[in-house]
Amino acid sequence: MADHRYRPPSSKWVAVNLRALSDRATAPAPANSSELRRVVFSSYLGSTIEFYDFLLYGTAAAIVFPTVFFDELDDLTAVLFSFGTFAAGYLARPLGGVVFGHFGDRVGRKKMLVVTMFAMGVASFLIGLVPSAAAIGGWAGVLLVTLRIAQGLAVGGEWGGAALMALEHADGRRRGFAASFANAGAPTGAVLGSLMLGLFSLLPDDQFFSWGWRIPFLLSAALLALGLWVRSTVSESPIFLRVLTETENRNRERPRLPLWAVLAKPKAVLLTTFGAGASFAFQTAMATFAQTYAVRSGTSRPSVLIGYAIASFVSVFAVLASGWLSDRFGRRPVLLAGILSWAALAFPLFGLWGSGSPVLVTLGFVLGLAFQALTYGPLGSFIGEQFGTGNRYTGASLGYQLATLLGGGFTPAILASLYAGANRSIVPVALFLIGAATVSAVAVLVIREGRHHDLATVTH
């Protein structure tokens, strides 16, 4: 596709389109434009904080934890064990989506967003306090996994609420753009995490591995306070409140478990899971394996982290642009463009990451995250539009979080195993990601286009 489609838009472009969200908002949207902008900003900021914590762990798992918590193992085995703790968070995410999704569908989206943010902030702060294996032995790994599971539960419930608050407040013609702000929080969080870890990685190795890497985790406490304040100021989803009122006025008994309603028609969950899976495979491959690969290929650790941070910053605007494109052309065409383009570039991207040149490594991350953004920006609307209001939080969270588990949770360990088993050849690694792209492309082709669906429908 032409390069101009992936050029990150200016901050003025974002402001104009965000203002258009407010100007076009109609019932049952918020009463004034400032409230709508506050809701979208809250979704963005909340996701930024949540994913700063969650993705910071991924970067640390790639370059810090093998040394701090698994130093008695050989290099590749230590990386595998570290990525195993990383996967624990993804295993917990679907459960978090179901639990918090249930209450989000019953008592409201806003309350669950506050609870999940608090849980994530506390878990991340405590990770920064876990003693090394040299100090407490195997208990260090146990504590690390426990806190990682807490992170997974929190982020599993957070995304659904953040995306749906923006989606359900916005005008139908701008839903994709509005919901993309929740996903734009992921690369923004990655920027912050990479910059913070990159800054402290400039310390001498003994200081960095002793205490320097802990500071970015401990700073979660300050981010938590900011996020809780912002989220406490927004209003509940108007669509949720309207459906809740109609249900009570008509004396309808809501399903005791929204999960039952979702699983009674599993097609939507399955197709959204497989359709979004490649996006997370690409994302986690770049956040973990590609960074380790670049460092071992001769690029310095700070250069890799800074390069990834630069690329993540570009990706923020690419995510928003892809959400905007999905409002114009549909969710499926944009998703397919990103999936197929990333697959076509898989081998060249690994060539850039293995070049040993900081400039080329950064270019590889910019290109990889730009095309991944096409698969990521529309996901909030793409998944949320497949479910009715009565079970949307549960259904969207479950589909999204199963996709993160399928596409992202085990990907770092699988890629490291393929790389080691092929005598450090990158060929099976690239082929695995191309295979994931093929599965997602088929699922996206099969699923229905939801751009024109009425979100106020109780069930789909």
Image (spheres, rainbow, N blue to C red):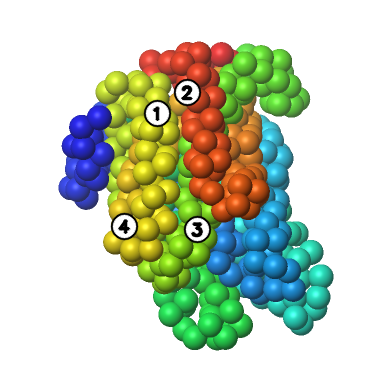
Total number of numbered labels? 4
Q: Nearer the viewer, mark 3 or mark 1?
A: 3
Q: Quadrant of the C terminus?
A: top right
Q: Is residue 81 above or below residue 339?
A: below
User: Mark 3 touching mark 4, by CB under 8 A?
Assistant: no
Residue 59 image position (x, y, % from top left): 53, 61
**Dot 2 amino acid type:** Ala
For the residue labelled by badge 2, is the local secondary structure a helix, a strand or a loop?
A: helix
The one of 320 and 446 positioned closer to us in this rendering = 446
Residue drawn at x 52%, y 36% as measured from the top left: 431
- Mark nearer the N terminus (4 vs 2): 4
User: Mark 1 touching mark 2, by CB under 8 A?
Assistant: yes
Q: Is residue 231 above or below residue 201?
A: above
Residue drawn at x 33%, y 63% as measured from the top left: 357
Quadrant of the rendered image containing residue 259: top right
Residue 276 image position (x, y, % from top left): 52, 31
> Mark 2 highlights which residue?
441
Q: Nearer the viewer, mark 4 or mark 1?
A: 4
Q: CA distance from mark 4 to mark 2?
A: 29 Å
> Mark 1 highlights which residue?
340
Q: Quadrant of the N terminus?
A: top left
